[in-house]
Amino acid sequence: MVKIDDNGQMGKAESIIPPLVVILFGVLLLVWSADYGEAARRLPATTAALILVLGVFDLLSRVPSLPGRFLHTTLGAGFDDREIDFLPTFRSEVVHFAWVIGVVSSTILLGFLLTIPLFVFSYMYLLGRRRLWPALLTAIAVIAGVGLVFEVLLDYTLFPGLLFGGELYS
């Protein structure tokens, strides 16, 4: 919820549900990654830690508090800045969080090399409303870069997904 003052100006976002959902997702990812071996745990644990930090920042920036004011002053976080000309709706936040869940699920099932171009293309084409060819070319360029860096230069095999013989616990 956002309060609109008598002059029609938006105030602080008051709903703390979106950042709480993000924080819960980060905790679940951290707990889930604890079952991995030391090397396999690094990426999901680091991702979970970043999700938790950003979720806490988002939560603090939504409530009137000293840490919230500090974040607003130092990082410019907040919905009441004049530079931010829109306030994301709750539906919009749910849609974006669903995309994150979809990417994680797709990575587990299909692996990185299929999920990355599918995500880039579908996000640009469906949500970003970009034309077909730019979205397709961007997806191809991104997967070519990822493949070149990880598979060729670093000689690191990316997780192929459960459907293609990958194992979560190896």
Image (tube, rainbow, N blue to C red):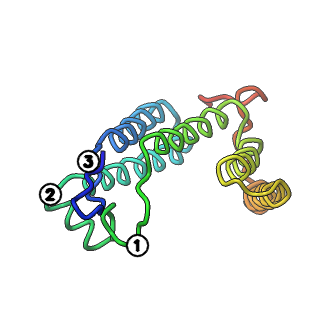
Q: Disc 2 or disc 1, which is closer to the eye?
A: 1
Q: Which mark is residue 65?
A: 2
The location of residue 97, given as percent across then percent down, is 50, 41
Alpha carbon separation for disc pair 2 and 3: 12 Å
Q: Percent from the top left, x then y, of residue 110?
A: 73, 34
The mark found on residue 14 in the picture is 3
Q: Secondary structure at mark 2?
A: loop
Q: Quadrant of the N terminus?
A: top left
User: Residue 164: horizontal and vertical position, in percent?
Assistant: 78, 29
- The residues tagged by marks 2 and 1 sit, at their Cα atoms, a distance apart of 22 Å
How many marks do you count on the picture? 3
Residue drawn at (35%, 53%) of the image: 53
Q: Nearer the viewer, mark 2 or mark 3?
A: 3
Task: Please tell me the numbered disc located at residue 83.
Answer: 1
Q: Residue at x 44, y 51 (%)?
A: 88
Which residue type does callout 2 highlight? Ser
| Mark sitting on residue 28 | none
Q: Amino acid at mark 1?
A: Glu
Say what secondary structure mark 3 lies in: loop
User: Does dot 1 land on a helix, a strand or a loop?
Assistant: loop
Circle 2 packing at 10 Å, graded few (<14), some (14-19), many (20+), is few
Classify the position of the C terminus by image quarter: top right
Mark 2 or 3 closer to N-term?
A: 3
Q: Is residue 126 left or right of residue 38?
A: right
